[in-house]
């Protein structure tokens, strides 16, 4: 007897676990592009489709279900990482800045300072950060082994969440036992779920992450943003020194230090669809979260959340990489948390 479409569909879903991602995440435009499902897939089933802004099936699935454990956009997983208060749990909130200068710091260079301490003190074997091709402004995940190379990777990359793509290679390398990694809130959520997974391969990945640094994040943009910025300000990509979003504007600093601004609403069509469903502004699942809002220009707001994070923070201070003060404007941070919650789009 011929099967109905619904029956065929149900059978397909039963055979291929990742179909749940297709139905519940990809087709509802909820995918954050964090690549967690790709990183955890030992069979190499999934690859990322840059244009669609989500993964797709490339190779056969071995039905291990690891991808279902780590996707922060599946409602069962979202419940596991939900927090009661806006800023999430924390031990300390500080204004901080790097004590070493850096041309590319986004705010106070606190992230670079923390990672430098971790590498210099050999608390980790490497740091997983986002590099940038300064000719094209294209970001790429980069593994850094020496503190001196971190400065080159400083600064926010608004067009990529691909950092977890490098995890697969790192896990194969037996010499790498401990990693410090940086990610936007969605990436941090995924790593946090990775740590809770019972899947053997997921556990292998999770075990290597010693420090998880989360960036505050209101939204990210697709790849076409850079070409659009370059067109609007009539400057080639190599002439862009820094891009920074804030106060309703995308601010672009050129190599001669002159500044151009584009109103953020003009760039709204470049915002990744999954960001419109994102509720976590401050990366609540990190060891330490870092952002610009809440602090004066040239400083970072640092939310230390875990004992592990506190240890790294103290070591960075003691080693003279970081200086810190009280006085973060928590209300300003909470305001953005609320704003982010407010704009959640109903699933399409
Ligand atoms: C997409 C995006 C949106 C953001 N939105 C806000 C916001 O609305 N409000 C706010 O206060 N802060 C926001 N931030 C965080 C802010 O821009 C700074 O990254 C943060 O304050 C740290 O600054 P810093 O000077 O301490 O870091 P730096 O010392 O400059 O170091 C930044 C580190 O982050 C890494 N990195 C940069 N981009 C990425 C990325 N996409 N994924 C993984 N690692 C990355 C770099 O490689 C570097 O190691 C956003 C960041 C991103 C990437
Ligand atoms: S992680 Fe496992 S279930 Fe998910 S796509 Fe890969 S092989 Fe299939
Ligand atoms: S949100 Fe992340 S884990 Fe979930 S489907 Fe998208 S890329 Fe995969
Ligand atoms: S808003 Fe930021 S944290 Fe949320 S999905 Fe987009 S990139 Fe990820």
Image: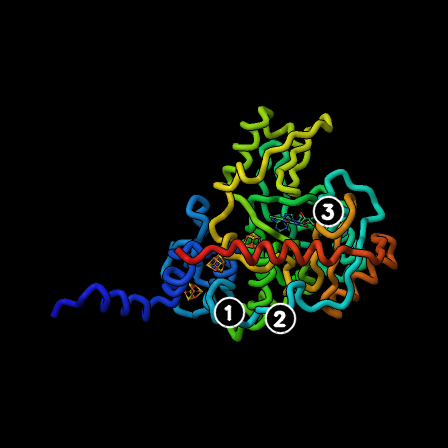
Q: Residue at x 72, y 25 (%)?
A: 256
Location of residue 71 in the rendering, given as x and y in whole percent from the top left corner: 49, 63
Location of residue 270 in the rendering, given as x and y in whole percent from the top left corner: 50, 41
Q: Nearer the viewer, residue 162 or 278?
A: 278
User: Does the beta carbon of the residue at mark 3 sit less than 8 Å from ligand 1?
Assistant: yes
Report the mark closest to the observer, 3 or 1.
1
From what the image shows, is residue 241 above or below residue 12? above
Which comes sooner in the sequence, label 3 or label 2?
A: 2
Q: What crowding class fits label 3: few (fewer than 14 Cα within 10 Å), some (14-19), or many (20 or more)?
A: many
Q: Which residue is mark 2?
A: 84
Q: Residue at x 40, y 63 (%)?
A: 24
Q: Is residue 96 visible?
A: yes
Question: Is label 2 in a helix, a strand or a loop?
Answer: loop
Q: Is residue 147 visible?
A: no
Which comes sooner in the sequence, label 1 or label 2?
A: 1
Q: Residue at x 76, y 38 (%)?
A: 103
Q: Which residue is mark 1?
A: 77
Q: Could you tell me how far apart the alpha carbons at marks 3 and 2 are, in whole angstroms?
A: 35 Å
- 172 left or right, relative to 149: left
Location of residue 23 in the rendering, given as x and y in whole percent from the top left corner: 37, 62
Query: Which corner quadrant holds the C terminus?
Result: bottom left
- 290 left or right, relative to 217: right
Report the mark closest to the observer, 1 or 2.
2
Q: Which residue is mark 3?
A: 150
């Amino acid at each position: 007897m011929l099967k109905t479409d619904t029956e065929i569909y149900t059978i397909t879903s039963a055979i291929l676990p990742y179909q749940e991602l297709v139905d519940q995440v990809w087709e509802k435009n909820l995918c954050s592009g964090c690549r967690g499902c790709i990183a955890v897939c030992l069979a190499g089933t999934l690859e990322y489709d840059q244009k669609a802004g989500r993964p797709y099936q490339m190779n056969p699935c071995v039905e291990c279900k690891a991808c279902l454990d780590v996707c922060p956009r599946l409602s069962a997983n979202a419940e596991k990482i939900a927090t009661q208060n806006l800023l999430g749990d924390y031990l300390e909130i500080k204004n901080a800045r790097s004590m070493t200068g850096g041309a590319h710091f986004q705010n106070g260079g606190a992230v670079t300072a923390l990672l430098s301490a971790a590498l210099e003190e050999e608390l980790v074997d490497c740091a997983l950060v986002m590099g940038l091709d300064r000719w094209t402004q294209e970001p790429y995940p980069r593994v850094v082994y020496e503190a001196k190379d971190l400065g080159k990777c400083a600064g926010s990359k608004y067009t990529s969440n691909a950092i977890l793509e490098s995890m697969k290679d790192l896990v194969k390398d037996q010499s790498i036992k401990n990693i410090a990694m940086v990610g936007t809130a969605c990436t941090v959520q995924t790593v946090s779920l990775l740590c809770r997974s019972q899947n053997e391969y997921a556990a292998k990945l999770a075990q290597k992450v010693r420090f998880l640094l989360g960036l505050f994040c209101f939204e990210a943009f697709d790849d076409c943003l850079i070409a659009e910025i370059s067109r609007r300000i009539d400057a080639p990509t190599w002439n862009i020194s820094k891009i920074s979003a804030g106060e309703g504007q995308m601010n672009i600093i050129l190599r001669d230090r002159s500044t151009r601004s584009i109103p953020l609403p003009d760039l709204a069509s470049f915002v990744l669809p999954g960001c419109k469903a994102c509720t976590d502004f401050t990366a609540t699942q990190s060891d330490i979260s870092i952002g610009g809002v809440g602090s004066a220009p040239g400083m970072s707001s640092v939310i230390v959340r875990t004992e592990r994070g506190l240890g790294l923070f103290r070591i960075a201070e003691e080693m003279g990489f970081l200086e810190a003060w009280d006085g973060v404007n928590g209300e300003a941070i909470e305001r953005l948390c609320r704003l982010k919650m407010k704009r959640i789009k109903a699933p399409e």
